[in-house]
Amino acid sequence: MGYRGVHRGRRSVLLFFGANQEKLSRDSILESAPEMLLQRMMSVQTSSPEAPTVLIADDESIVLRAISMTLINVGYHVLQGRDGNEARALLEEHRGQPLHLLITDLDMPGGGGQELAKFAMERYADLKVLYTSGRPPRALSAPLERGANSQFLEKPFATQELIKSIRALLTN
């Protein structure tokens, strides 16, 4: 599988093509994503023991995989939850071990991101939170609780925006 980048204004779009240059569907990309992720992870050095640990909670598998790959590639330890319930279970399993950052979608099954963040911060007092959503904060049903330990990043976002937000939170 190959890809070709198309630049449109501020955003870049990657178009994926199969061996015969046919444009691939979202489903065919998702089917091959686990294999591509495994190959990519094997080619990346493992993170150091003191690297920050990040829990990512997002019900969109392609977003979850993309964020995870990005963070693994820059050396973070990554935990993945496909919804609020799975993320809560990971928090319980991980209890007593360091957790530095929660990246959570605001709208997902099993409880939204704000509920998950509250649950997580009860267990990890110094936890930083990066909220994500495809809707701007003013369009959310409940006001977003923000402070020095949290930020909001509207989807879609560029890898550089994600890394910049994470570093700002972790160095705060």
Image (cartoon, rainbow, N blue to C red):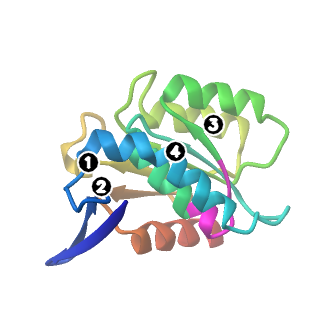
* Secondary structure category for the residue under label 2: loop
Label 2 crowd bin: few (<14), some (14–19), many (20+), radius 10 Å = few
Res 134 label: 1
- Disc 3 marks a residue whose amino acid type is Ala
Cβ atoms at labels 2 and 3 below 8 Å apart: no
Q: Residue furthest left?
A: 8
Closer to viewer: mark 4 or mark 3: 4
Q: Which residue is mark 4?
A: 34
Q: Which residue is mark 3?
A: 120
Residue at figure coordinates x 76%, y 64% from the top left = 47
| Distance of label 2 from label 4 (alpha carbons) | 22 Å
Label 3 crowd bin: few (<14), some (14–19), many (20+), radius 10 Å = many
- Quick one: label 3 or label 1, which is nearer the N terminus? 3
Q: Residue furthest front?
A: 20
* Secondary structure category for the residue under label 3: helix
Closer to viewer: mark 2 or mark 3: 2
Foreground residue among 82 and 125: 82
Which quadrant of the rendered structure holds the C terminus? bottom right
- Quick one: label 4 or label 3, which is nearer the N terminus? 4
* Residue 145 can be seen in this image: no
Left or right? Give the position of 84 relative to 38: left
Q: Position of residue 13 (x, y in %)?
A: 23, 67
- Disc 1 marks a residue whose amino acid type is Gly
Foreground residue among 7 and 15: 15
- Quick one: label 2 or label 1, which is nearer the N terminus? 1
Disc tally is 4
Foreground residue among 92 and 21: 21
The image quadrant of residue 20 is: bottom left
Closer to viewer: mark 1 or mark 4: 4
Part of the protein shown in magenta: 71-78
